[in-house]
Amino acid sequence: MENIVQIISIKDITHNVKRFRMTKPAGFHFNAGQATELSINAAGWKDEKRPFTFTSLNNDSFLEFTIKIYNDHQGVTNQLATLRKGDELILRDVWGAIEFKGPGYFIAGGAGITPMLAILRQLHQYGQLEGNKLFFSNQTDQDIILQDELQDMLCQKVIFTTTRQDDASHDHRRIDAAFLQAEVIDFNRHFYVCGPDQMVSAINETLKQLGVKPDYLVFEQ
């Protein structure tokens, strides 16, 4: 099913990430962590579909997507960066395997924070963040998406790592076996993993080697 939605606002979140808010069709429903396919309602772009995760919550009156813009090629996100308030997008059916299944550890790389952002916002809204912790890896300070909001929600239950900036004020470790052994207290919890495919695959394999049950790994397959 397709719906035409109109952009309400666009805001810069980082140097290459924008927040798009748009109208929400009547009766439209999704769960925190889920995604959809969007395309731009303009000639030459209507069939160029790309997956994006909702960062709004289902009870919001608008839809929100927090999208990394790739300016190095003329693709969909580059075109999204040219849009303005009032422009239209085509919204499709909801899908996605990442959903909250119980307290645990959230492991994100870069724009992989988006499904977790929605889940953490929902848990925060209902006062249910207790027992959850976030490990968020980026290349540099300026790449961290919504650091202040995540810090405010999670307080001491978040570790930001920056792997390509030696003078950053954050942790510099990569999220590998040594990191996980040092920071994870209980490997019998759920682990939510999202980021570049290679990172997700490597972390999932490491977690299994550390004793995490496959059923406790939550990721987009």
Image (cartoon, rainbow, N blue to C red):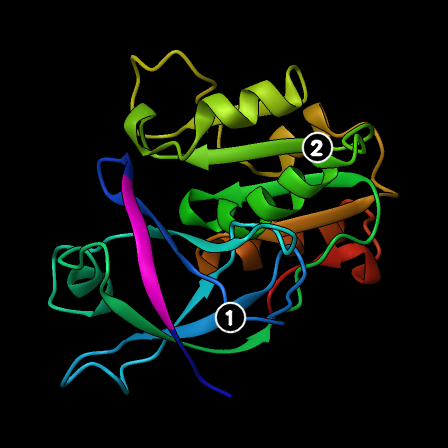
The residue at the point 31 percent across, 28 percent down is 140
Residue 217 point in image, percent of width and height:
74, 56
Query: Does the magenta portion include 94?
Result: no
Figure quadrant of the C terminus: bottom right
Q: Magenta part of the protein: which range?
A: 5-11
Q: Is residue 191 depicted above or below 176 in this figure? A: below
Nearest the viewer among 63 and 124 is 63
Residue 142 falls in which quadrant of the image? Answer: top left
Query: Does the magenta portion include 6?
Result: yes
How far apart, in angstroms, are the residues tagged by discs 2 and 1?
25 Å
Q: Is residue 103 depicted above or below 56 in this figure? A: above
* Element at label 2: helix
Nearest the viewer among 126 and 73 is 126
Residue at the front extreme, as displayed: 26
State left or right for residue 125 relative to residue 117.
Answer: right
Question: Pointer 1: residues within 10 angstroms few (<14), some, or many (20+)?
Answer: some
Residue 96 falls in which quadrant of the image? Answer: bottom right
Residue placed under numbered mark 2 in the picture = 124
**Which amino acid does the dot numbered 1 rest on?**
Pro
The residue at the point 30 percent across, 29 percent down is 164
Residue placed under numbered mark 1 in the picture = 25
2 or 1: tag closer to the N-terminus: 1
**Which amino acid does the dot numbered 2 rest on?**
His
State left or right for residue 166 relative to residue 215.
Answer: left
What main secondary structure does the magenta stretch of the protein show? Answer: strand
- Mark 2 against mark 1, which lies toward the viewer? 1
Residue 152 point in image, percent of width and height:
58, 19
